[in-house]
Image (spheres, rainbow, N blue to C red):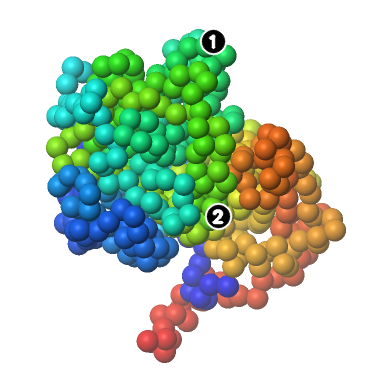
């Protein structure tokens, strides 16, 4: 349990979202001004960057790291890691420094649920066109993409990235985050899990026997990356949601070969085509679940038509290592907000808080707090959380608790499960749910056969509804009494 003075997080006054930056360089300047940025020069991409990630990215409170003058790369080509810890979460999302993570998620939810998309604006030129590499000048390997994990099958330039595709039938532009591995100077692999919007687009092109145009934004500001990797409804363009969050249209330029739009202030963009039948082995890759993901035997590659980049370009890296790490931290805030909205819109009343826990990569372990109103309310909330759009992909456990439990605190959630759940009666299961080849519990044979299913456990850890008012009282003082005790005796802890 938490310290006695730690009451449930109270709702902070939503002072509104006020971003202090327009692009990654503005963001970096603000981080540096706060003393939260360290620059490492002369590291190599083979081992050094991965080692620094292991040392720095598991813990909150560590600074962002900017690697410069990386061995074997042109001077000034850089990569940023560990960008979403401490108050850099607040900076990225545009909320006050004193907001805790639950307050950030509330603020994010309140800000985003009332937004209307602002269509992106196409302009003729932008900083990303400072350098245009085509033909023999194309060389993806000169960028400081690291070997993130020693057992990875190659250098992954696309981790903190988003991929822009167009539906060949409707023209809908989608941005999604999928891993991107370097094959050679002019080819990159692009793995997309079945069911993801980019995969649906790709399947349509391949069925038509047509090449799919692709733009891969591998250098961007953290908010754009966060927006692109947060679940959005089919037909919604994330470029327009980026504008909605900012309050103004995102200025975009279009690729000279594909005609696809991408932000004009991007750091690095790779443009190309996936041609039907072109596949090669991809991976393995240390994935967000904390395991070395399997090698994919036949994944499409992108033939690179052009690379666009700013002077002294910066890659955005989202390291994939054993949890916890930054990838889970940023998704926990946004996915928790989206989950709460999904559950409420499905008609479940009095959902007080939701948290997609970092320890489960913000997918595998969901905690939902409700104020119970009727028999079956907790079971309903749990099933909706497991199967709504934001919760359906590669989940595992959903624990539903009463509103007096802090859903962000693992110890409190497990305490509720231990004391308010009768396992024989209060744990239900969903079978044949949407999973992925990345799921470590899917057998090699099933993975090879495309049987990408798993199950979900729905744990009702609420007081039994029909006698909840007679349930034993929690043996803790009131918040006022706890505060008085800490005001008088906290000095004993020093």
The numbered mark, 2 or 1, whose residue comes first in the sequence reads 1
Helix, strand or loop status at disc 1: helix
Q: Residues within 10 Å of mark 2 (few under 14, many from 20)?
A: some
Q: Residues within 10 Å of mark 1 (few under 14, many from 20)?
A: few
Return the x and y of residue 236 as percentages of the image width and height: 46, 23
Label 1 near label 2: C-beta < 8 Å? no
Residue 175 occupies quadrant: top left
Q: Residue furthest bottom?
A: 492
Return the x and y of residue 9 as percentages of the image width and height: 48, 60
Instruction: Give the camera-side residue of 217 and 154.
Output: 154
Quarter of the image containing the C terminus?
bottom left
Return the x and y of residue 467 as percentages of the image width and height: 81, 59
Left or right, 257 with reference to 293? left
> Gap between marks 2 and 1, in whole Å?
36 Å
User: Is residue 21 visible to the viewer in this orientation of the structure?
Assistant: no
Instruction: Give the camera-side residue of 259 and 494.
Output: 259
Pointer 1 residue: 208
Return the x and y of residue 174 as percentages of the image width and height: 43, 24
Left or right, 93 with reference to 233? left
Q: Residue at x 34, y 50 (%)?
A: 146
Left or right, 226 with reference to 463? left
Q: Residue at x 78, y 47 (%)?
A: 429
For residue 291, which numbered disc appears in the image?
A: 2
Q: Residue at x 50, y 59 (%)?
A: 322
> In this picture, is 445 found above or below 164?
below
């Amino acid at each position: 349990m938490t310290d006695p003075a730690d009451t449930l997080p109270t709702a902070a006054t939503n002072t509104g979202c006020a971003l202090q930056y327009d692009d990654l360089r503005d963001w970096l300047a603000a981080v540096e001004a706060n003393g939260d940025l360290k620059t490492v020069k002369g590291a190599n991409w083979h081992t050094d960057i991965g080692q620094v990630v292991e040392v720095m990215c598991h813990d909150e409170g560590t600074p962002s790291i900017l690697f410069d003058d990386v061995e074997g790369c042109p001077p000034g080509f850089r990569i940023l890691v560990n960008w979403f810890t401490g108050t850099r979460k607040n900076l990225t999302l545009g909320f006050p420094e004193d907001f805790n993570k639950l307050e950030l998620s509330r603020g994010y939810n309140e800000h985003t649920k009332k937004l209307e998309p602002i269509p992106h604006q196409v302009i003729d030129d932008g900083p990303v066109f400072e350098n245009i590499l085509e033909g023999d000048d194309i060389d993806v390997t000169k960028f400081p993409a690291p070997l993130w994990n020693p057992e990875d099958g190659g250098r992954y330039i696309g981790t903190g990235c988003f991929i822009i595709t167009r539906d060949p039938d409707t023209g809908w532009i989608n941005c999604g985050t999928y891993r991107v591995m370097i094959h050679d100077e002019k080819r990159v692999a692009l793995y997309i899990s079945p069911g993801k919007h980019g995969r649906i687009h790709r399947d349509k092109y391949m069925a038509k026997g047509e090449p799919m145009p692709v733009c891969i934004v591998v250098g961007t500001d953290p908010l754009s990356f966060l927006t692109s990797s947060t679940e959005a409804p089919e037909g919604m363009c994330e470029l327009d949601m980026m504008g909605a969050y900012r309050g103004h249209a995102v200025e975009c330029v279009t690729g000279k070969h594909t005609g696809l739009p991408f932000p004009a202030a991007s750091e690095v963009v790779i443009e190309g085509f996936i041609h039907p039948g072109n596949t090669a082995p991809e991976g393995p890759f240390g994935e967000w679940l904390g395991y070395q993901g399997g090698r994919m035997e036949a994944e499409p590659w992108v033939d690179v038509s052009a690379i666009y980049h700013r002077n002294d370009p910066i890659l955005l890296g989202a390291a994939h290592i054993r949890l916890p790490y930054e990838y889970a931290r940023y998704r926990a805030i946004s996915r928790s907000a989206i989950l709460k909205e999904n559950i409420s819109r499905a008609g479940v009343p009095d959902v007080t808080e939701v948290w997609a826990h970092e320890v489960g990569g913000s997918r595998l372990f969901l905690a939902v707090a409700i104020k119970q109103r009727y028999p079956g309310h907790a079971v309903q909330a749990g099933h909706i959380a497991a199967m709504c759009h934001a919760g359906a992909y590669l989940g595992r456990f959903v624990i539903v608790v009463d509103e007096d439990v802090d859903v962000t605190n693992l110890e409190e959630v497990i305490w509720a499960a231990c004391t308010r759940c009768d396992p024989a009666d209060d744990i239900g299961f969903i079978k044949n749910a949407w999973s992925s080849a990345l799921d470590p519990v899917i057998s090699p044979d099933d993975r090879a056969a495309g049987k990408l299913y798993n199950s979900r456990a729905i744990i009702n850890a609420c007081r039994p509804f029909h006698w909840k008012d007679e349930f034993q009282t929690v043996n803790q003082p009131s918040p006022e009494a706890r505060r008085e005790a800490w005001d008088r005796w906290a000095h004993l802890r020093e």
